[in-house]
Image (tube, helix red, strand yellow):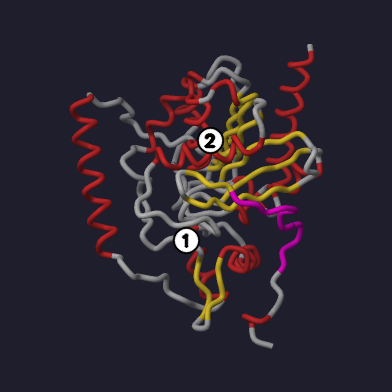
Amino acid sequence: MSVDEQQVSYPGARRPDRHREVISSGIALHVCEWGDADARPLLLAHGGFDFTGTFDVFAPMLADAGWRVVSWDQRGHGDSERAALYTWDSDVRDAAAVLDSIGPDPVPFIGHSKGGALVLHLANALPHRVSTMVNLDGLPSREAMSDVSDTERTRLLHQQLTSWLDHRRSLVGRRRRPGTIDELAERRGRMNPRMSLEWLRYLVTVGATCDEDGWRWKIDPTMRMGGFGPWRPEWSMLRLPGIGVPFLGVLGLEIEVMGWGTRPDDVVPNLPPGGRLEALSGVGHFVHIEQPRRVADLVLEHLDATAAGALR
């Protein structure tokens, strides 16, 4: 039996209990759920170039504690539809559409990396829909985080959209390069050097499709690193002080290719009142994958404390 025909598994990984579809501005989003359908819901957002399958160990831990974990493949990722262009605002609208599909009541927002910044913006836009928030290494930081004038913002919008259009035009008809499970795992390992080969091989089988000529990651090839449309990632930090619900930030202190390089001193001055930061030594950017049990316990402790506070 060849390596591509073998059943690839990973200790503790569990696929979602349910799959469904949500339409957002004409784009079909693939939504996954772990846990009892009648349990308390929470919204969980993945990072850039990731997909819901990256939560296959972490999400079941939250579900087993009595939560209905709702996540989705962001447009251009996983099994959600591709778009002609990708912008930050469209990702926020997609998140709102998934949130609306859960129900009208406030729910916890949890996000990793880009997803952490995404739910931060969602909470600012829809403060009445969030009950508490957990940010998993999703607070980009730079030494110069000042905003820009409206004139410069318009110029930046023009420059970024022009760059996106030129990039998109150059990739018309392109497909991702195929490979074996091990070859795709090796490629992913360049961006996730702290991840085990066992995990990376499992990730291929849930995040890639097997075509006649090999496996391909289910990520739109027109997407690129270094930005999500006309937006500066570090602007997300400016939204943090305005969060009006209990907040937990989890920061991995090991520097990685896909990480932001954010340090505790960058975050603490921007924490909302009562906000808490947990900085994890010896852990990289993918905190929920490297140490899922530890991070899940931190999250569950925060959710329980929030619920207890609401009852008093």
Quadrant that contains the C terminus = top right
Which of the 4 image quarters holds residue 228?
top left
Closest to the observer, 14 or 173: 173
Magenta stretch encompasses residue 17: yes
Against 214, is 105 above or below?
A: above
Q: Which mark is residue 219?
A: 1
Q: Which residue is mark 2?
A: 96
- Kindly identify the amino acid type of the residue bearing the numbered disc 1: Ile
Q: Magenta residues, as a range?
A: 9-21
Residue at 53% from the left image edge and 27% from the top image edge: 123
Residue 72 position within the rendered picture, expressed as x and y whole percent measured from the top left: 59, 48
Predominant secondary structure in magenta? loop
Tell me the SS state at disc 1: loop
The image position of residue 122, as x and y in percent, is: 50, 31
User: Residue placed at 52% from the left, 71% from the top?
Assistant: 184
Looking at the rendered structure, which numbered label has been put on residue 63?
Answer: none
Up the image or down, 62 lies above or below 207; here it is above
Determine whether, in the image, residue 200 is placed left or right of residue 256.
Answer: right
Task: Please tell me how crowded label 2 is: few (under 14), some (14-19), or many (20+) other residues with Cα within 10 Å.
Answer: some
Residue 245 is situated, as x and y percent measured from the top left of the image, at 60, 20
Classify 10 Å Cα crowding around label 1: few (below 14), some (14-19), many (20 and above): many
Residue 288 appears at what percent x and percent y?
63, 46
In the foreground, 276 or 246: 246
Residue 267 colored in magenta in the image: no
Distance from the alpha carbon under mark 1 to that under mark 2: 22 Å
Q: Residue at x 50, y 71 (%)?
A: 216
* Of the image marks 1 and 2, the number of the one nearer the N terminus: 2
> Residue at the spot x=42%, y=31% of the render?
236
Label 2: element kind: helix
Q: How many marks?
A: 2
Q: Quadrant of residue 127?
A: top right
